[in-house]
Image (cartoon, rainbow, N blue to C red):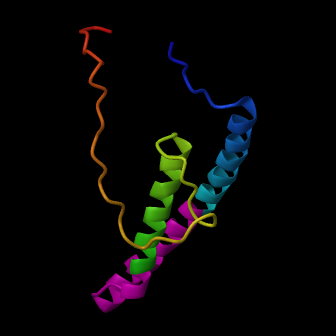
Amino acid sequence: MTQEVTPTTNHIWIRGLYMLLFLLIMGLAKGIVFAVAVVQFILVAVNDTTNVPLRKFGQGLSTYLYDINQFLVFNTEHKPFPFDDWRNTPPEEEPLELDQDMEYQDGQ
């Protein structure tokens, strides 16, 4: 007899609180992305070149938003910054895991 592992009710509510926190952080981060994009545009228009530190910061912010999205849609249990280190590198593409028992049924 196989037992399915289901998250406890307490665990899901705690995760829900983390999700609310990260939704608020994501809203702030999107505003910062907008500001970085505007400043970078102005700098390129004036200097004909990008600001490298600002571009690196933008990459880190984009990766951070990706990490938050992955947590929010239950693709990972990994909580991003401030619960883990800040990443500046783009996320690595993860291989798609297919359930071998799952069959494609047309129209379902």
In the rendered image, residue 96, in percent from the top left (x then y), is placed at 28, 40
Specify the segment rendered in magenta: 29-55
Give left or right: position of 43 versus 22.
left
Give left or right: position of 43 versus 83.
left
The question of residue 44 being in magenta is answered with yes
Residue at point 29%, 31% (across, down):
98
Q: Main secondary structure of the magenta part?
A: helix
Which of the 4 quarters of the picture holds residue 37? bottom left
Seen from the viewer's position, the closer of residues 108 and 99 is 99
In the rendered image, residue 46, in percent from the top left (x then y), is placed at 35, 89
Seen from the viewer's position, the closer of residues 88 and 54 is 88
In the rendered image, residue 41, in percent from the top left (x then y), is placed at 38, 77
Which of the 4 quarters of the picture holds residue 100? top left
The question of residue 59 being in magenta is answered with no
Give left or right: position of 32 versus 18.
left
Give left or right: position of 28 versus 44.
right
Q: Is residue 51 visible?
A: no
Which of the 4 quarters of the picture holds residue 91? bottom left
In the rendered image, residue 28, in percent from the top left (x then y), is placed at 62, 62
Image vertical order of residue 25 relative to residue 86, above or below: above
Image vertical order of residue 15 relative to residue 58, above or below: above
Image vertical order of residue 22 relative to residue 81, above or below: above
Image vertical order of residue 56 relative to residue 12, above or below: below
Q: Is residue 71 visible?
A: yes
How many marks do you count on the picture? Answer: 0
Residue at point 42%, 73% (across, down):
88
Residue at point 33%, 9% (across, down):
108
